[in-house]
Image (cartoon, coloured by chain):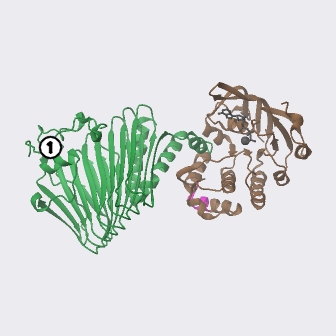
Amino acid sequence: MSTLTTNYLAPTGREEAWRFTPLARVGGLLDSAVAVSSVSSIKIVNSENGVKLTVKSVGDQPAISTSDDLATIRAREVVTEVSHIEIAANTQLEQPLLLERTNLTGKPQASRTLITCGANSHGTIILNNSGDAILSDEIEFDLAQGSTLTFVSLQEWSSKAIHLGRQHAVIAKDATFNSIVVTVGGSLVRLLPTVEYSGPGSSADLQGLYFATDGQHLEHRLHVDHNVPNAKSRVNYKGALAGDKAHTVWIGDVYIRSNAEGTDTYELNRNLLLSDGARADSVPNLEIETGEIVGAGHASTTGRFDDEQLFYLSSRGIPAEIARRLVIRGFFAEIVGKIRDEEIENRLMDRIDSELAKVGA
Amino acid sequence: MSTLDIKGLQVSVATEAGFTEILKGVDLTIKSGETHAIMGPNGSGKSTLAYSIAGHPKYTITGGSVTLDGVDVLAMSVDERAKTGLFLAMQYPVEVPGVSVTNFLRTAATAIRGEAPKVRTWVGEVKEAMKSLNMDPNFAERNVNEGFSGGEKKRHEILQLELLKPKFAILDETDSGLDVDALRIVSEGVNRVKGNRDLGIMLITHYTRILRYIKPDFVHVFSGGKIVEAGGPELADKLEEKGYAEYTTA
Ligand SMILES: Nc1ncnc2c1ncn2[C@@H]1O[C@H](COP(=O)(O)OP(=O)(O)OP(=O)(O)O)[C@@H](O)[C@H]1O
Ligand SMILES: [Mg+2]
């Protein structure tokens, strides 16, 4: 427990990083007067060869990156134990490694995890966040040379859950980090999928999907730091909103530093507003300090259902409700398909269908 | 034997300046097995007529009626119109990202037939229809119209015509954008459906070329939002030769 803080100052809401977040709803996670307890919140569901999980004291396992995110700073002050998942060098995971949350009490908690991928290891990790939680969570990824990690983070929280999280990858030479973030549950979710590079030839592919209904606040703040030459990044987030006061925020910050020649980056955010009273904020931001790059671009669109698509489908006898479902599924298909798991795909699509039916969109 | 009856149809679209009337009283009766060619200058309202019958929300009906065997079509939702036996092959078919042709066709057939087609016969049916339209089987896995060439989109429309088996088909410039071979293949497709099903056809076109394959029983000249002359197949040849000058008042 920690109520005495040294360098932590709670956000006021005036900060650029917090101006969209309803601070009254973060469940005390940012309030230095509220006790936040340390939790080792990750467990492995299926054991896989070449993978091990150890819980270490913070002193033995310091953070591998710096962060100016106030939620992360607070979590780092609070947390006493770090869960360390190691994928040994040269391991090829046959099956995705499945992670679940454990020890969550529904009271304010903070958790830290480090996932290290040994040189030339390849694998997929799927983290399923479900149930009740008031959690401030940091997951760091350390990708060694030549490794590939696909990390799927499913936020299927209960409707009360509050989740502030940072998922930060440090990607070494010729390593590839694929992230797929799916946020459909929770009352308030604010996630920071961020990457930096530690060697050239490295690459990050950050995909995401969010679907907000009545009163949900789902915020994703991406940050790609092109701090080495010849690295690549792709960002593609798609969101849909339905119902009163559904609010989503997408921030895409991409920095190309002066030494990052040969950078190749593109980021895209598309939002579909399915009913009145919902609001999608989308702010792409590209800062370029060198002109010697392969390419850099961004795009952001927010729109309603395409009437022409719906008309086309209906004109073939497909009832309006099914036509809308097809269009939504189609909209998300490109992201969901990347998970390559039919069961998860069906579960997510069914959830989206039933949420849609609930709001009558 | 069915009858599609269009009487005094008046249609407007909303513009910034208010409503603009585009169809100014269209009268046309099509019976099963008949082919009616509609020819007329650009902007005369042919697509508006087609979309209005299909129920596109952009168009407001301000007068007249459309009935199929006496039943009011204009009171139906778009999907009900399709279920009742109307099909519109669009001039500009719409891309639907993320929805595969397979899924789309099956969903449409399920809706129109009122039950899901039997998997085994259905797959064969689709394959056969694609083959006869010279469509590569891999189109089935692609997203609806996404990245299709102009001609491929038109074939895909006729594929749907074959599978959905309507009573009446409105073909809006299905011939535009087709190469010589594709025109023949697509026309054969239409004729196949017509022969099998006693299909009634409204064929909107700018060219007599397609009329050599799909023989019209009647040709109508469309100008200024209505039909201004009707005749037999010979009228098409006259139009090709002389143009629309005598029908446009401007
Ligand atoms: N939203 C709109 N606002 C203003 N005018 C419109 C709108 N939609 C259609 N129109 C006008 O209605 C008229 C009829 O258009 P329509 O597409 O029906 O013509 P068409 O006969 O099919 O022409 P084409 O041979 O070029 O396909 C045109 O002048 C068109 O500009
Ligand atoms: Mg037209």
Q: Quadrant of residue A27?
A: top left
Chain A's shade in the image? green
Answer yes or no: is residue A84 visible: yes
Answer yes or no: is residue A135 visible: no
The local secondary structure at tag 1 comes to loop
Mark 1 is surrounded, within 10 Å at the Cα level, by few (under 14), some (14 to 19) or many (20 or more) other residues, namely some
- At 64% from the left edge and 25% from the top edge, which residue is drawn? B17
Q: Is residue A174 above or below residue B235?
A: below
Q: Which chain is brown?
A: B
Residue A179 location in percent, x, y? 34, 57
Name the residue type under label 1. Answer: Tyr
Q: Is residue B49 above or below residue A51?
A: above
**Quarter of the displayed picture in which ligand 1 can be seen:** top right
- At 29% from the left edge and 49% from the top edge, which residue is drawn? A192
Q: Quadrant of residue B29?
A: top right
Region of the chain picked out in magenta, as a range: B115-123
A23 relative position to B125: left or right: left
Q: Chain of mark 1?
A: A
A97 relative position to B52: left or right: left
- At 45% from the left edge and 61% from the top edge, which residue is drawn? A294
Residue A358 location in percent, x, y? 40, 37
Q: Between residue A46 and residue B72, name the one nearer to us.
A: A46
Residue A23 location in percent, x, y? 24, 35
Q: Between residue B124 and residue A110, name the one nearer to us.
A: A110
Give the mark count. Answer: 1
A120 part of magenta stretch: no
B151 relative position to A284: left or right: right
**What residue is shown with label 1?**
A8
Residue A89 location in percent, x, y? 26, 73
For ligand 1, tell me if the residue under mark 1 lies within 8 Å.
no
